Amino acid sequence: MEERQTMGDQKPENGQSERTILESDQVAVTFDLENGFQIMMPDYDGEEDLPEGALALIAVGMRLTDDPVFYQELVSWMKSRLDQVQT
């Protein structure tokens, strides 16, 4: 991940900040073709413990760009299960 953005730091083309729909206790990994993967999370001062679920999601997001073998394994695993995904 080249840039980690905190919740609310999204900058559209007009340069003004936009808030996200995330609550203050939520994290998300997002993807788009222009920016790749991004981690979105509330401001964190390092003194609070993040919930394990948040840590796991952040770790997966970071490994998606840092570990090409992990990325390919994850994509292959998901492709083999696409018939199980409901839209």
Image (cartoon, helix red, strand yellow):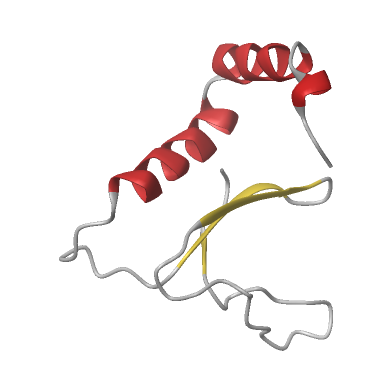
Residue at 39% x, 50% y is 54
Which residue appears at 55% of the width and 55% of the height?
A: 28
Is 44 situated above or below 31? below
Q: How many marks?
A: 0
- Residue in the image at 63% along x and 75% along y: 21
Q: The N terminus appears in which quarter of the rendering?
A: top right
Asked if 32 appears above or below 56 in the picture, the reply is below
Along the line of sight, the residue nearer the viewer: 49 or 85:
85
Residue at left offset 56%, top offset 71%: 22
Left or right: 42 in relation to 31 = left
Q: Give the side of residue 25 with respect to residue 64, left or right.
A: left
In percent of width and height, residue 50 lies at 27, 56
Quadrant of res 65:
top right
In the rendered image, which quarter is residue 73 located in?
Answer: top right
Quadrant for the C terminus, please: top right
Q: In the orientation shown, which residue stands out farthest toward the left?
A: 47
- Residue 23 image point, x, y percent: 49, 75
The vertical placement of 50 against 9, above or below, is: above
In this rendered view, identify the residue nearer to me: 29 or 53. Answer: 53
Tell me if 61 is positioned left or right of 46 in this view.
right
